[in-house]
Image (cartoon, rainbow, N blue to C red):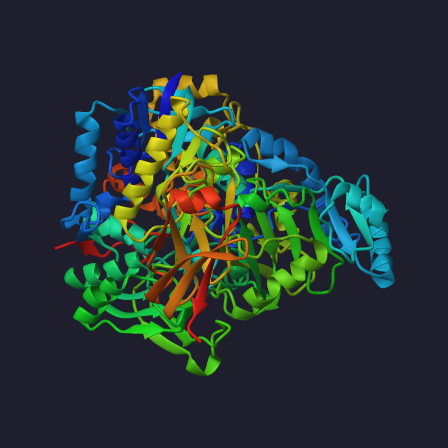
């Protein structure tokens, strides 16, 4: 019997799991995919929003501003890359300027620090490559960028260091309310838990319904992105948004913590919760749209494109509630969900306590985690010491991103363990550079096969039937 | 301090090393990131290598072995499993391997011979899902020929570059079905002999002016949508066609791997994506030379070896301070000729100029002008982007020239 079962190992489930792992609780994290951080967590804008977008008084506003303030320390504790680069919301005319003024007022009401309206000359001082027709901007010095899957993987790793169990490939098919505990069933397994926390992203309405709560629906809003070569990462240093509309924050142009340039997302409401296809229309239009905000973006430096699904709830706010005793919904976590995630975790723990969960701090809770980038970020002297102790750190496997065999082995051996190619990619950046795994993927297949002691034919890209080879040659 | 450090132990690096040795340099070190010398030839187990250079037909590994054997016989030093991380403008090389850790070497001269990489799927803007089963042709070649595993059973290939053509045959021989090779251009970017021997001999359809517009399948690839493209390379919606397959191989161009080169401040050509070099293959940083696919993409390894010999000799002369740079003659092109290598000439000696054209042309003249004066004209029955061409310029021609331009003239 678990005290807590968390459904969904994205950044929300992960941050909640970490927060709960500081207490004397037996907890498990259930994930339907083969790895953690595979839903919206791996495909979003990777932004820690300052907090001026959400309407005053909403959970979104409150948790965003609070989460944004908590993020830098958490990132440091978990060794997650986080850069406080500041953000600009740019406008092109008087009407936009008015919208920016109301954003500023909203930001001030939300107690976002340091907001300021800038004119074109002031913007150019910050960003020489700003779009030709940009006339004004709202500057938010507290805006930041982070690697969202790095945060989720690290938070979950930290929780596991404190004893939380992770069960992947556990897709919930049935939830039975036994009065004082719930039974959560998948096709092959079942577990019992006293408290259930529903962090199932786009599927959170489905999970709520399985538990008998029909109070909300979630639909997916597709967001397509282009990721550009590191050569382009220095075109701008701030995250550049356009003046928002009712469909969201529009197409942003942002550097990433790893030095790439990110363009996106689109915002297309849909029905299919598994449809992460990119569209022809996106490729045809993205550069034209991005060029309005930022000039000089090369059109021939794309290294990959992807699509993420935001979970849009039908209440207009985050849906964080307790519809039934000992069952917590954490649903409709669209933007600014990543930014709010530390505060959401804190808030959920409070809710659980109000719902009767006895919370007693662990005596020796681990709150920090060795960074997955420890080798990469070490000095040459430190690296040489590490290579001496473990020669695998001297062997580069992914040449585009400079990832060593030692780091890949760490990813396969450290909780939460990578068991497929994409898992290695998210933890180490191997296969994430400009050749997109062309050179290194055969080596990584070999390392996975050796470490996990499974044949090549069983190695997958991302679980299920995503096999990478079919059989041996003749 | 080492006289000559060569980055890359593939055909270019080995040939450059041997040439430098034969021109009197003894203190040579090759740095190779893989676990043996040979570079990409190690996975090219088909034949057809060496016809020009060695006057016999070899497989890739055999061709590589000839050079590796020579490197060993001459006692040229090399470090394997060694990755160069950075090179400074003053020729300090920072590299890493498991034995030495991260180390620095100061070189008198450097030859860049890092080769190239394949254009990845991400650069092609293909819509749809992102399933397993999409590989660049070279990655598939490595899986099949080195690791001994088949990437799939039912194959579509996008791009008719030579590696794609070779893999069409290879996959067929291994029992897979190659359903189509789609080529965006109205002509193949592969060698004519490969079209015959790898596609036609196996009845594999080559769909010219076709591209892949979308991928299907959530876990493993289940099929691709292909389409004919119009004259602006835009897919025509009415021609969309679904082909079920579990594997898509991409052979959509090779990109010289010049990240180290850029870090050194060497000037690159926007056409070749390689360094701008003179007749000795010396880059815009004195004492740094480049050859092979890192300089410009070759179709035949034989030409790589030739070019590397020039670079090896050039580096040897640089080290012995016997370079004789007396002139500076730029070579420009008309666009129909996309580029030349070298892009400039700095010595009065015979120089072979290599070049590529931008389209298929028949019965043309390659005219070389010095300023506005025609100084050389060479007839060609057929030229194509896939096949590198050469023109020899004599020392006499060069001694009278100041500004050369290569122009392709079509018959009226």
In the image shown, does A127 or A79 lie closer to the viewer? Answer: A127
In the image shown, does A315 or B324 lie closer to the viewer? Answer: B324
Q: Residue at x 25, y 54 (%)?
A: A469
Residue A343 lies, with reference to residue A214, above or below; the image says above
Which percent across, then down, holds residue A120? 83, 50
Q: Residue at x 78, y 45 (%)?
A: A124
Quarter of image, res B258? top left
Q: Residue at x 44, y 51 (%)?
A: B340
Q: Residue at x 13, y 49 (%)?
A: B56
Residue A431 visible in the displayed image: no
Which percent across, then down, holds residue A443? 30, 41
Residue A318 visible in the displayed image: yes
Q: Quadrant of the C terminus of chain A?
A: bottom left
Residue A411 lies, with reference to residue B385, above or below; the image says above
In the image shown, does A410 or A279 lie closer to the viewer? Answer: A279
Outermost residue to the bottom: B238
């Amino acid at each position: 019997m678990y005290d807590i079962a968390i459904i969904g190992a994205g950044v929300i489930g992960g941050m909640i799991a970490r927060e709960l792992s500081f207490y004397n609780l037996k907890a498990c994290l259930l994930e339907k995919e083969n790895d953690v951080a595979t839903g919206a967590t791996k495909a979003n804008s990777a932004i820690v929003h300052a907090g001026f977008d959400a309407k005053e008084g909403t959970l979104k506003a409150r948790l965003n501003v609070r989460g944004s303030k908590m993020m830098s320390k958490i990132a440091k504790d978990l060794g997650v890359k986080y850069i406080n680069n500041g953000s600009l919301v740019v406008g092109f005319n008087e009407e936009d300027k008015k919208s920016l003024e109301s954003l500023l007022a909203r930001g001030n009401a939300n107690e976002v620090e340091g907001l300021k309206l800038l004119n074109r000359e002031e913007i150019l001082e910050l960003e020489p490559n700003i779009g030709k027709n940009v006339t004004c901007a709202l500057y938010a010095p507290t805006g930041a960028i982070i690697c969202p899957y790095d945060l989720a993987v690290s938070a979950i790793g930290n929780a596991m260091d404190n004893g939380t169990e992770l069960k992947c490939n556990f897709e919930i098919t049935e939830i039975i309310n036994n009065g004082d505990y719930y039974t959560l069933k998948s096709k092959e397994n079942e577990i019992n838990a006293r408290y259930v926390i529903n962090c199932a992203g786009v599927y959170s309405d489905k999970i709520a319904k399985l538990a008998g709560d029909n109070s909300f629906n979630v639909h997916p809003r597709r967001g397509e992105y282009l990721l550009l070569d590191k050569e382009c990462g220095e075109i701008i240093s701030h995250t550049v948004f356009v003046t928002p509309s009712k469909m969201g924050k529009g197409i942003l142009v942002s550097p990433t913590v790893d030095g790439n340039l990110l363009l996106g997302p689109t915002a297309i409401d849909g029905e299919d919760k598994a449809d992460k296809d990119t569209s022809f229309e996106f490729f045809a239009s993205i550069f034209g749209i991005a060029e309005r905000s930022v000039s000089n973006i090369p059109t021939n430096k794309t290294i990959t494109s992807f699509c993420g699904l935001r979970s849009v709830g039908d209440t207009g706010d985050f849906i964080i509630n307790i519809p039934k005793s000992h069952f917590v919904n954490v649903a409709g976590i669209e933007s600014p969900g990543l930014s709010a995630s530390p505060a959401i975790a804190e808030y959920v723990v409070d809710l659980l306590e109000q719902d009767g969960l006895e919370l007693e701090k662990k005596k020796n809770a681990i709150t920090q985690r060795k960074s997955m980038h420890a080798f990469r970020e070490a000095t040459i002297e430190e690296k040489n010491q590490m290579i001496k102790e473990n020669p695998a750190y001297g062997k580069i496997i992914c040449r585009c991103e400079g990832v060593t065999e030692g780091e890949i082995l760490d990813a396969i051996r450290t909780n939460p363990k990578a068991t497929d190619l994409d898992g290695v990619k998210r933890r180490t950046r191997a296969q994430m550079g400009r050749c997109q795994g062309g050179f290194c993927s055969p080596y990584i297949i070999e390392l996975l096969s050796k470490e996990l002691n499974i044949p090549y034919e069983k190695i997958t890209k991302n679980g299920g039937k995503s096999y990478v080879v079919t059989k041996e040659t003749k | 301090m080492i006289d000559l450090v060569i980055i890359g132990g593939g055909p270019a690096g080995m040939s450059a090393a041997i040439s430098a040795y034969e021109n009197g340099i003894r203190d040579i070190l090759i740095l190779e990131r893989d676990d043996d010398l040979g570079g990409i030839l190690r996975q090219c187990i088909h034949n057809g290598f060496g016809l020009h250079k060695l006057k016999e037909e070899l497989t890739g590994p055999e061709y590589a072995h000839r050079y590796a054997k020579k490197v060993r016989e001459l006692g040229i030093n090399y470090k394997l499993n060694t990755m160069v991380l950075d090179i400074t403008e003053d020729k300090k090389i920072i590299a890493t391997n498991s034995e030495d850790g991260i180390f620095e070497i100061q070189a008198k001269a450097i030859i860049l011979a890092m080769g190239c990489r394949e254009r990845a799927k991400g650069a092609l803007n293909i819509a749809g899902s992102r399933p397993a089963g999409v590989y660049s042709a070279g990655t598939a070649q490595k899986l099949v020929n080195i690791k001994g595993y088949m990437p799939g059973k039912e194959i579509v290939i996008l791009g008719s570059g030579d590696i794609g053509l070779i893999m069409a045959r290879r996959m067929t021989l291994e029992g897979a079905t190659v359903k189509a090779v789609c080529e965006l251009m109205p002509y193949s970017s592969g060698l004519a002999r490969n079209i015959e021997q790898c596609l036609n001999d196996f009845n594999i359809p080559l769909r010219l002016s076709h591209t892949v517009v979308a991928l299907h399948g959530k876990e493993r690839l289940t099929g691709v949508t292909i389409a004919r493209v119009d004259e602006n390379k835009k897919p025509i919606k009415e021609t969309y066609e679904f082909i079920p397959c579990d594997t898509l191989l991409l052979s959509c161009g090779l990109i010289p791997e010049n990240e180290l080169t850029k870090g050194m401040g060497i000037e690159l050509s926007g056409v070749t994506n390689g360094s701008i070099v003179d007749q000795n293959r010396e880059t815009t940083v004195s004492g740094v030379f480049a050859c092979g696919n890192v300089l410009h993409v070759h179709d035949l390894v034989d030409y790589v070896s030739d070019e590397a010999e020039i670079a090896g000799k050039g580096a040897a002369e640089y080290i012995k301070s016997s370079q004789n740079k007396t002139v500076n003659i730029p070579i420009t092109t008309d666009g129909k000729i996309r580029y030349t290598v070298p892009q400039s000439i700095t010595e009065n000696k015979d120089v072979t100029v290599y070049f590529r054209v931008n389209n298929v042309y028949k019965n043309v003249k390659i005219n070389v002008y010095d300023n506005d004066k025609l100084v050389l004209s060479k007839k060609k029955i057929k030229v194509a982007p896939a096949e590198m061409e050469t023109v020899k310029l004599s020392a006499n021609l060069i001694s009278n020239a100041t500004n050369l331009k290569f122009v392709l003239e079509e018959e009226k």
